[in-house]
Image (tube, rainbow, N blue to C red):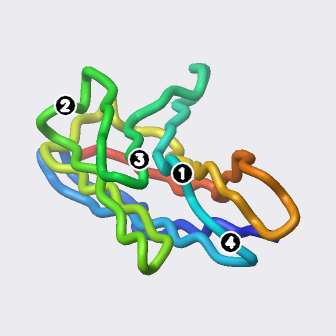
Amino acid sequence: QVQLVESGGGLVQPGGSLRLSCAASGSIVSINVMGWYRQAPGKQRELVARITSGGSTNYLDSVKGRFANSRDNTKNTVYLQMNSLKPDDTAVYYCNADVWAVGVRFRDYWGQGTQITVSS
């Protein structure tokens, strides 16, 4: 069994910063890609950022230059540093990881989601 636990959400003013963390735990053999998705009310879930085990990153165009995705492979943890936040960034943010667990080849796991609200 693999669990992803997120932390770091909350309310922030426009232009502010937040840092999300997501720690994977359980019978983990290896983690391939880790990333963050978000879903705003009435909209589809979208990929915000992803990072491979080797450190290669991809970002949603609207967050490029403002968000930074990183990971600590020794802690099975992924981070999302969010700067210059805008009201349009308001959403529930979900952590995602492609995990090889004991007895289960690579499959997707999801965190519980954390609310980010950008408002004055």
Image quarter where the N terminus lies is bottom right
Residue at mark 3 to residue at mark 4: CA–CA distance: 16 Å
Q: Residue at x 51, y 26 (%)?
A: 46
Q: Which residue carries the number 2 mark?
A: 64
Residue at mark 1 to residue at mark 4: CA–CA distance: 11 Å
Residue at mark 1 to residue at mark 3: CA–CA distance: 6 Å
Residue at mark 2 to residue at mark 3: CA–CA distance: 17 Å
Pointers 1 and 3 in contact (C-beta within 8 Å):
yes
Circle 2 Cα neighbour tier, 10 Å, few/some/many (<14 / 14–19 / ≥20): few
Q: Secondary structure at mark 1?
A: strand
Q: Which residue carries the number 1 mark?
A: 32
Which is nearer the eye, 76 or 106?
106
Of the numbered discs 2 and 4, the one sitting upstream in the chain is 4
Identify residue type, mark 2: Lys
Residue 55's x, y, as percent? Answer: 30, 51
Residue 57's x, y, as percent? Answer: 30, 40
Residue 28's tag is 4
Q: Residue at x 53, y 45 (%)?
A: 92
Circle 1 Cα neighbour tier, 10 Å, few/some/many (<14 / 14–19 / ≥20): some
* Rendered view: 77 above or below 31: below
Q: Is residue 36 left or right of residue 26?
A: left
Q: Quadrant of residue 84?
A: top left
Residue 6's x, y, as percent? Answer: 53, 66
Of the numbered discs 2 and 3, the one sitting upstream in the chain is 3
Identify residue type, mark 1: Asn
Pointers 2 and 4 in contact (C-beta within 8 Å):
no
Residue at mark 2 to residue at mark 1: CA–CA distance: 22 Å
Identify residue type, mark 3: Thr
